[in-house]
Image (tube, helix red, strand yellow):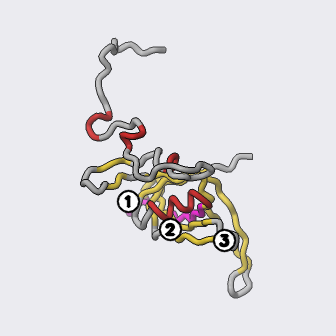
Amino acid sequence: MLNRIIIMGRLARDPELRHTQTGTPVASFRLAVDRDFRDKNTGERATDWIDVVAWRGTAEFASKFLAKGRLAVVEGRLQMRDWTDKDGNRRTSAEVVADNIYFGDSRRDDNGGSYSGNGYGNNNYGGGNRSGGDYNRAPADYGIPSGDDQFSELADDDGELPF
């Protein structure tokens, strides 16, 4: 069976970091995810509010680097949870259990420059089952060009496709 989900949206609130009785970190937050289509009458996009739960290193990453309004990409699995409300009614909730979390936007650094956190942020910050990582490394330290250096002409390009 396959249960994989990837969503991108803005945090509706700061992640809430808690610890289980055994000390395992767990963070929860909600993403506002716009739908791909607009309403015919109003021209507005509907928004889905999706609950996300992250564990261990991924939870610590979320609580340290994500904040309300920040754009994030979450990769994980969909989980249904049954519970009983205060009136004794049975309820079911859907939530995404995050395996990896990535920055979906850019953030300014302390020197006024900007860097994009797309894709490499959580890979080196202890998300999922990964460990370690240097929180202060710049994208250039990972071999990722910054600024105007992102694209350049190939000197030996003959214009022919290789296939």
Nearest the camera: 9 or 27? 27
Q: Residue at x 56, y 67 (%)?
A: 28
Please state if 126 lies on the left or on the right of 12 as rendered: right
Residue position for label 1: 43
Instruction: Looking at the image, tell me whether mark 1 or mark 3 is earlier in sequence order.
Output: 3
* 139 shown above or below 64: above
The Cα atoms of the two marked residues, 2 and 3, are separated by 16 Å
* 37 shown above or below 142: below
Residue position for label 2: 15
Q: Residue at x 37, y 47 (%)?
A: 116
Q: Amino acid at mark 3?
A: Thr
Camera-nearest label, 2 or 3: 3
Mark 3 surroundings: few (<14), some (14-19) or many (≥20) residues within 10 A: few
- SS class, disc 1: loop
Residue position for label 3: 20
Q: Amino acid at mark 1?
A: Gly
Q: Residue at x 28, y 40 (%)?
A: 147
